[in-house]
Amino acid sequence: MKIYRVIVFLSIFINCGSIPMATGRVLGDANWGTHMAPLFVAVANTDGPILEMGCGDFSTPLLHALCAPNNRFLLTAESDEKWMKLFDDLKRDWHHFVHVQNISKWEDVGLGIHWSVVLIDHAPAKRRVVDIKRLRSYVDIFVVHDTERKYYDYEPTLSTFKYKYTYRRYKITTTLLSDTIDVARFFKN
């Protein structure tokens, strides 16, 4: 990873540059953001389009800030339209939002593009494994939030990837998956 790139990303995220921000909202539970470090690392080590499946107070502004310097394409998909509208101020020609109106419409999300990074953090939970399988051949790195939760039934799917790294700093874990990139090397000293 180029140190310059990390410095630019961090300065944008911390200072938010010229990125307009909605104000007056209360930030959600910190446990909803336990995937920030692995997500940042995946984005910093790739340079293609990003798909965010499920928007949130932690991931959506971070991804937006990381993509802004180069107008890197970012697609945010969300099933809760009211929740998604809280992020309307982030819409750009390079940051698109799509409302997934019903469970069957998740089948259409992400088609026709090879994604550098796909964040899996959407509802309903039963769609997560389905969408990992569906998009697998079009994704360099999956960042999968909440992998400690047995009822999401992530295994045995996650164990079929060539490369897998679980970020265990917090009780709520995040796993990076890839068939082409050794994601564990991002976390070695």
Image: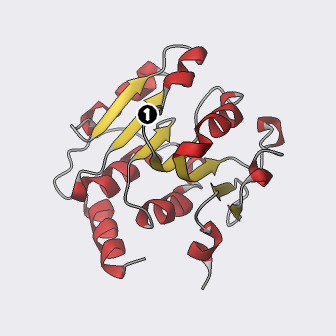
Check the image and report above or below for 111 versus 42: above
Q: Quadrant of residue 20?
A: top left
Image x and y of residue 81, in percent: 43, 20
Name which residue lies at 25% across and 44% down. Answer: 21
Q: Which residue: 76% across, 37% down?
A: 152
Instruction: Name the amino acid type tagged 1.
Output: Gly
Q: Please identify the quadrant where the N terminus is shown.
A: bottom left
In this rendered view, identify the residue nearer to me: 70 or 148.
70
Place of residue 150 in the rendered image (x, y in percent of width and height, measured from the top left)? 83, 42
Residue 57 visible in the picture: no
Q: Looking at the image, which is closer to me, 107 or 83? A: 107
SS at mark 1?
A: loop
Count of numbered labels shown in the rendering: 1
Q: Residue at x 77, y 52 (%)?
A: 160
Residue 69 in view here: yes
Residue at image location 37% in from the left, 47% down from the top = 61
At which x and y percent is residue 168? 71, 64
Residue that carries the numbered disc 1 in the rendered image = 112
Farthest bottom residue in view: 189
* Image quarter hosting the C terminus: bottom right
Q: Residues within 10 Å of mark 1 (few under 14, many from 20)?
A: few
Residue 46 lies left or right of residue 54; in this view the side is left
Residue 112 placement (x, y as % from top left): 43, 33
Horizontally, residue 115 falls left or right of residue 92, namely: right
- Vertical arrangement, residue 45 with respect to residue 152, above or below: below
Q: Is residue 18 left or right of residue 100?
A: left
